[in-house]
Each structure stands twice: as structure tokens, then as C-alpha cells.
Amino acid sequence: GKRRRKRFPNDVVGAWAKISSSPSYSWDDYGQIFQEGFRIVLPEEVASDESLNVAKQMEDWLIGMEEMAARKKEEGGKVDVAPDIETYESIIQAWVRTGTLEGLLKAEGWANRSINDGIIDAEIGKEEDCLILTSPPPRLQMFHPIVAAWTYCRHDRGPVRVKEWIDRLEELGRDKPELRPDGRVRSALIFAWKRHQTHIMRQGEIWKRYSRLSSEGLESCNGVGVKKEEEFTDITTNKRNGVLSTAELSFSAAKKCASSLEELCSQLRKQLLIVRDDVDHDNCGVSEIFIDGSVFLHVVDAWKDSAVAFAVAEHTISLAQKKINHRQEDARKHIKSQHALSEMFNTVRLFDDFIEIYCNLIAIEKSRADAAHGESDNEELLYNLQLQLQYLLGISFQVHSTAVSGLRQIDTATSHLPYQSTTKNSASNFVSFFPRVEMMLRRSFELQQMVLPDI
């Protein structure tokens, strides 16, 4: 008979879309919980801390349920009540929502227990009563709160821990495909590095310095703001090095964002080739990915912020060193800023390329449906492709406008430097990148004219 191709099931249309229907698994909730990083609870405050008490009471209740089930099992009796997977997920969620590092490690302990069939990972530590009863096998959504917590916690090792969990789930997914990281989990690494970059720039006072440049602007160049400008010349060597170090760390974080996006897009390309070539998904070993368009925006923003950081560092150090005899060093910082801008536009182009890919795939699927004279089984796939395209189109204007605003911000930070009018770097970034800007704006206009799929 006619072979039916396996189509993207509805639950693949963004694991985040499926999970967010339940308020208990919202990424935004965890972003709010860890807005200021891990919460510090003093020893004398533990007993009165509501979230810690709730998590501990839930854990004690679960362990009691396990003990009772284990005793009945040993006695040969019928086990009427036993914890299921949702019970364990509730415990993980409760510990994560304490907003503490200790709570997150507790949550990881329960997750590791489920993975390792009652064996707690050595990194987390040995937990009491962990071998009483084998916990039920895990499912992917069990790990969402843990990944989200490491994504938003602003801890130095946050992005590294997210990567470790993605790699671990990838390994588990070889034997259990349902545990393969989906688009939501993979995207978390991009969010984690961007949040890390934002934290770095805040600590390095990059935006505080940029705000001064924005407010003083050309006034300092015209001599009106000379007194304020002279304040920069009093910056100590350590502080000057600190500004440059912040810019370098920001650039490194942007590179990590970009490489994470490239890896995600690589998985997506494999999936889309399967769709294009009409291959059965069953034995292809490729995860089905629904990509959140905001990942492109985060990477564009990361490169923009990196370029701004180097522009601010260039301004700060040049004024502090009186600028005259340091043109070679400034040229190196200028090159880094230009590199970041080039990568920003490369990310925009990558975003536009994927929109084109989805448009082409939708056209292919529609032609297949027409050729099948109504007997095709591709309705669900076509729906999913159109939904993905809709998400990308919905964020296209923001992606393009972020890139343009980045050029403006960098010009603001560098246009009034005393040496700008006498060096080859004097042209504004907007002028230098005008061909790319023009092409991008034309593309943005074309996308806005597209009729969104009626789904």
C-alpha cells in the first residue's frame, strides 16, 4: 500500500508551546525567579522561608510515599499509591522555584536519580533514602526547570551547566529518542550566553559609560564638555584594562551565542533536508526541531552589544591616554568592533536564509498536495511549516531594526572622538555598512508584504 511519511507531530511544534499551556512550566516564571541571580538565604532564615519549607515538605511527603510503597511491595501486598513521573517533576520544580543554588542542586539530584535508576550523580552528592524505590523513567519536560534555572541564574557556570545538560540529554536520546533535546532546550544555551554577556557588561559599567557618551555626545568634541571629558584621563590603568577586558569577555560571549545558533541551525537543516527529500523520519536519527525566532534576535543583539562594548572601550582608553600616540592599539579595538558588526549582519542574513528555506518548503509541500489530488498526508506537516514561518516573519522587523540600531549606537560612541576626523576610520559605521543596510531594509520590506499563512 501507499507508504505514509511520518510527519512532524503536533507536540513538536515547539516543546515550549506545549509546556507553556501549563503555567507550571513557563520559562518566564524562572526568568523572574532568577532575575537577580541565586537567592541567598541565611541559616537563621531557613526555618521561616516559605518556598524552602514547601519544597522540603513535598520532598518528605514523596519519600514517605516511597517508603510505604516499598514496605507493601516487600510484604507482598498490593501497592495502592505510588509516585508517578509527575510527582517527581513537581519536586524538581519546587526545589528550582526556591531560587537558591542549593535548591537547584537538590532538583538536579532528583533528576539524576530518575536518570540513573536511583543512583545519585557523584557531583551532586549522596542523598538519603535514594535507593528505596526505583523512580519512574524520565521525560524531557522533567529537565526544563533545571535548564531554565541555569539559563537565567546569572552564575558564571550557568551556560556551561546548560551545555552539560544538553550533551547529557543528547547522549540519553541515543537509546531513548523521547529524551533528545528539542528546540526549546537547545535554544536555552543561546539565551544563557546572552544573559551572561548582559551581566558582564553591567558589571563592567559599559552601559553606564555609553549613557554618558549619548548625553554628552558631540558637545565634548566641540569643547563644551571638556571638563567632563578630562574625567576620563584620570582613569587608572587597572580600570582602563578592566573596560577592555569587559569588551573582550563580551565578544567571547557573543561568539558562544553564535556558535550555539550555528549548531541549532545545523540540526534544523538536517531536519529540513529530510522534509525536502521526502524521507521517512523513523530511522533517520535526527531530532525534530521547532526553532524560536527570538534566538536570532538574541545573537544579533549579542554581536551588537559586543561592538558597542569595544566602541566604548576605544573611547574611554583613547581619552585616558590622550589619544595621540596610541593609534595602533585603537585600530585593533576598531577592528574588533567592525568584526562584531560583520558577524551581526551575517546573523541577519542567516535569519533571512531560513525564511527563504521555509517559503520554498511550503511551496514544495503544496505542489505535492496538488499532485496527490487530495490524497496526500501532508496537511500536518504543511501546518507546522507554516506555523514556523509565521513565527519567523513575526520577529523579522525586530531582527532587522536591532541591527540598524546597533550601527547608530556605535556611531554615537565613536563619532565625537578627537581623532575621528583625521583617520581612515572616520566614516560612520552606517555609511561603511550602507550596502548591507540597504539590502537588509529592502528584504525587511519584502517580508512585511508577505501574507502570513492562514493557520
Image: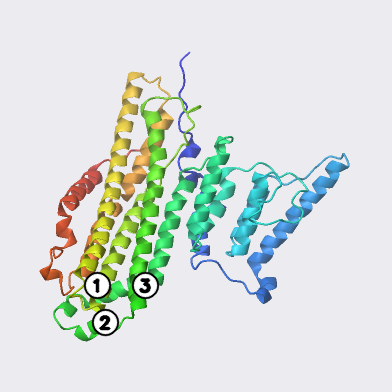
Q: Is residue 194 above or below residue 42?
A: above
The percent coordinates of residue 94 (x first, y second) are: 63, 58
Determine the secondary structure under disc 1. Answer: helix
Q: Nearer the viewer, residue 273 or 159?
A: 159
Amino acid type of the residue tagged 2 in the rendering:
Thr
The percent coordinates of residue 44 (x first, y second) are: 68, 76
Q: Is residue 42 above or below residue 144?
A: below
Residue named by callout 1? 315
Quadrant holding the C terminus: top left
Q: Identify the disc placed on residue 242.
A: 3
Q: Earlier in the sequence, mark 1 or mark 3?
A: 3
Q: Earlier in the sequence, mark 3 or mark 2?
A: 2
Protein image colouring: rainbow
Amino acid type of the residue tagged 1 in the rendering:
His
The local crowd at label 2, few if under 14, some if 14 to 19, many if 20 or more residues have their Cα within 10 Å, is: some
Q: Earlier in the sequence, mark 1 or mark 2?
A: 2
Disc 1 from disc 2: Cα separation = 11 Å
Q: Quadrant of residue 356?
A: top left
Disc 3 from disc 2: Cα separation = 15 Å
Residue ranking furthest to the bottom: 227
Q: Is residue 290 visible?
A: yes
